[in-house]
Image: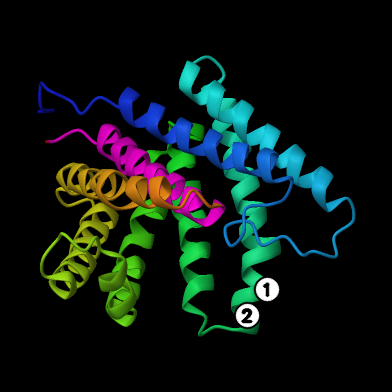
Amino acid sequence: MPDAVAVPSRPGRLVFALAIAGLGAQDLIQGDFVRGLQPVPAWLPAHAALAGLTGAVLVIAGAAIAAGPGARTAARVVTALLGLWLLACHAPILVADPRNGSAWTSALEVFAIGGAAALLALPARPALGRIAFGLTLPAFGVLHFLYRDYVAYVIPAWIPGHMFWALATGVAQLAAGVAIVLDREARLAAVLASVMFGAWVVILHAPRVAADPQPPEWTSLFVAAAMCGGAWLVAGSRERR
């Protein structure tokens, strides 16, 4: 029997929507594509105009997802746009330099956010978005292990045991991803993943933005918020049996 208390998906949808709108606002404010996340070639004609158009689409889509009416259509637009970035922009970079950890991180972030958007875009087929989102988490865990020194470095100085947390969060992402993909305690895994990403927003990214409000820091904050909201959406899509 389904559990009487379901995980509410609306807060997750709002967090996810704000993150999408935030990424769009970056495009509009910068007059350019978000570096790393949107690696659109500089030689593309009307570069600034396309960046502005992309930003406007993301802001409007984020507002529609947050408002409710039109959320499914908006989520489909976001899913399609992220898919375009993956195929047209990220895939060539990864093929040319498959050992580029930074490129893999950005591509996986786009894939994960696209999976979360697919949960809203295709509510009749929640497994597609859930599996897409879940597949990225073990990959992020592996990247935490490979680049553990960098992960340990960005952890706030007041938190003891930097290397422990760098490795522990990698293990947590591995475990959560496997549980979500295999649909074994997927809801619990998604809830815990959402808490973890939300904690990163508050403990890590918000203070870094306050200290140095440069575009890369804002991007990292919005991505972490999108991951938090995405994991929340995964949790809301699952009923404990």
The foreground one among 183 and 143 is 143
> Residue 72 appears at what percent x and percent y?
53, 26
Q: Report the span colored magenta.
A: 215-240
- Quarter of the image for residue 57 reads top right
Query: Does residue 128 sit above or below 44 in this rendering?
Result: above
Q: Quadrant of the C terminus?
A: top left
Say what amino acid the circle numbered 2 marks.
Val
The foreground one among 149 and 110 is 149
> Residue 60 appears at what percent x and percent y?
63, 26
> Residue 222 appears at what percent x and percent y?
45, 44
- Quarter of the image for residue 141 reads bottom left
Residue located 42% across and 35% down the image: 16
Query: Does residue 115 sit above or below 141 in this rendering?
Result: above
Sort mark 1 into few (<14), some (14-19) or many (20+) by Cα contacts within 10 Å: few
Q: Which mark is residue 92?
A: 1
Number of numbered discs on residues: 2
Disc 1 from disc 2: Cα separation: 5 Å
Q: Which mark is residue 95?
A: 2
Q: Which mark is residue 209?
A: none
Give the SS element for disc 2: helix
Residue located 17% across and 75% down the image: 163
Q: Does residue 55 show up magenta in the picture?
A: no
> Residue 119 appears at what percent x and percent y?
43, 38
Residue located 65% across and 56% down the image: 85
Using residue 218 as the reference point, say whether residue 78 is left or right of it: right
- Quarter of the image for residue 77 reads top right
Say what amino acid the circle numbered 1 marks.
Pro
Pointer 1 with pointer 2, Cβ within 8 A:
yes
Residue located 29% across and 37% down the image: 232
Using residue 141 as the reference point, say whether residue 115 is left or right of it: right
Query: Does residue 73 sit above or below 81 in this rendering?
Result: above
- Main secondary structure found in the magenta portion: helix
